[in-house]
Image (cartoon, rainbow, N blue to C red):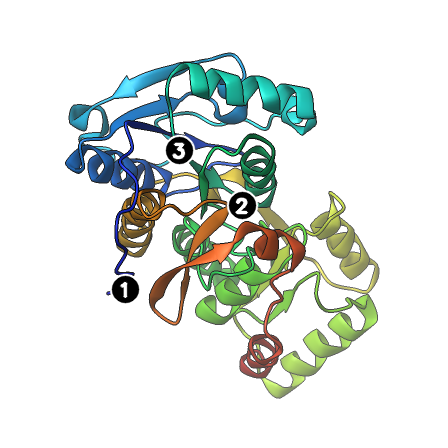
Amino acid sequence: MYKLPALDAVKELKAIAVLTSGGDAPGMNPAIRGVVRAALSHGIRVYGVNRGYSGLIIGDIWEMNSRSVTNIVQRGGTLLKSDRCEAFKDPTVRHQAAEILREREIEGLVVIGGDGSLTGAALLAEESGIPVVGLPGTIDNDIHGSDDTIGFDTAVNTALDAIDRIRDTALSHERLFLVEVMGRDSGFIATQVGIACGAEMVVIPEVEFKIQSLCFQLANNRVKGEGSSGIIVVAEGPRPGLTYRIAQQLEENGQSPKVCILGHIQRGGSPTGHDRVLASCMGATAVDYLRAGYSSIMVGVQKGEVLDVPLKEVLERKKPLASEWIAMSSLLHK
């Protein structure tokens, strides 16, 4: 269980709003439910914004009640829908969004999403003065200031379930499979999945990849009778097609790999119990922070404690994949 902050309410809020933005992540619905139920318990009206910032700038907003979030904790995706809104990068558009919130007498906003969504939240709060609290909703787990993000645990377990099935074929045919998981700029998913599934190796953006070294290691493993899982986990990387390029290079070096792209199945499905609890706690605590007069913060979790992190700090710093986890991944695959 998480240690929750003890916050004193200094503001009586009439109404707040909540939106989900960017890529969807399993656990967004429990987070929405946490916001709605916590706010209503304090007599605060709650408005849901459809399709993230795209809905906010056109006033696609509706009042929610307790029944609005009944039976959604087990559902993947987001009840409020989501979108990537390029228009929100324009200060004029953000001003328009702030005016819409003021017209509805909305005195606080909770934004659930990744780094792009949190950037929009920080700019809106800075320029308009409207209190905004962000929640880290992304399967990539790459948000600074929080040890965990909403959706990461589910994405890892979804990938593991798929790989466990792929391994049956890999072992039956003594065949090598390259399994691509999400992670354009970070290897959090790939590393955790690789360790958990017992992959022969993991390819991640944080470590330089050399095809000759890979082929040598595969051959050496076969000679020693090691690395028999037949699975290589590959983070997708910044350039599309990485896994197919690796497969082609392996073929040119005498291997016969098969490619399996897990893709967006990692975003979908029912959130794990871990993600439901994490998201629910973050959602309810976001309301407490708004009532306590906070703004321009993200609710994060560090060492089992739910706490606030300034959005400026979140956005200025990158969360690195710890070197010891990279080393552990390499060690266990030998």
Q: Secondary structure at mark 3?
A: loop
- Badge 1 vs badge 3, beta-carbon distance below 8 Å: no
Where is residue 126 drawn, in percent x and y?
58, 38
Where is residue 301 drawn, in percent x and y?
40, 61
- Whether 153 is drawn above or below 106: the answer is below
Where is residue 172 drawn, in percent x and y?
48, 61
User: Of circles 2 and 3, which is in front?
Assistant: 3
**Quadrant housing residue 302:** bottom left
Of 195 and 198, the residue lying toward us = 195
- C-alpha separation, residue under disc 1 versus residue under disc 3: 25 Å
- C-alpha separation, residue under disc 1 versus residue under disc 2: 31 Å
Q: Residue at x 54, y 20 (%)?
A: 97
Few, some or many C-alpha atoms within 10 Å of disc 3 (few <14, some 14-19, many ≥20)? many
User: Of circles 1 and 2, which is in front?
Assistant: 1
In the rendered structure, the answer to whether residue 66 lies left or right of residue 261 reads left
Q: Which residue is mark 1?
A: 2
Of 91 and 174, the residue lying toward us = 91
Q: Residue at x 67, y 20 (%)?
A: 92
> Is residue 130 among what the camera can see?
yes
Which of disc 2 and disc 1 is earlier in sequence?
Answer: 1
- C-alpha separation, residue under disc 2 versus residue under disc 3: 38 Å
Which of the image's four quarters has the N terminus? Answer: bottom left
Residue type, numbered disc 3: Gly
- Whether 165 is drawn above or below 71: the answer is below
Residue located farthest toward the front when viewing the structure as drawn: 10
In the rendered structure, the answer to whether residue 222 lies left or right of residue 52 reads right
In the rendered structure, the answer to whether residue 158 lies left or right of residue 257 reads left
Residue type, numbered disc 2: Leu
Q: Secondary structure at mark 2?
A: loop
Q: Residue at x 62, y 77 (%)?
A: 323
Kindly identify which numbered label has been placed on residue 108: 3
Q: Which residue is mark 2?
A: 262
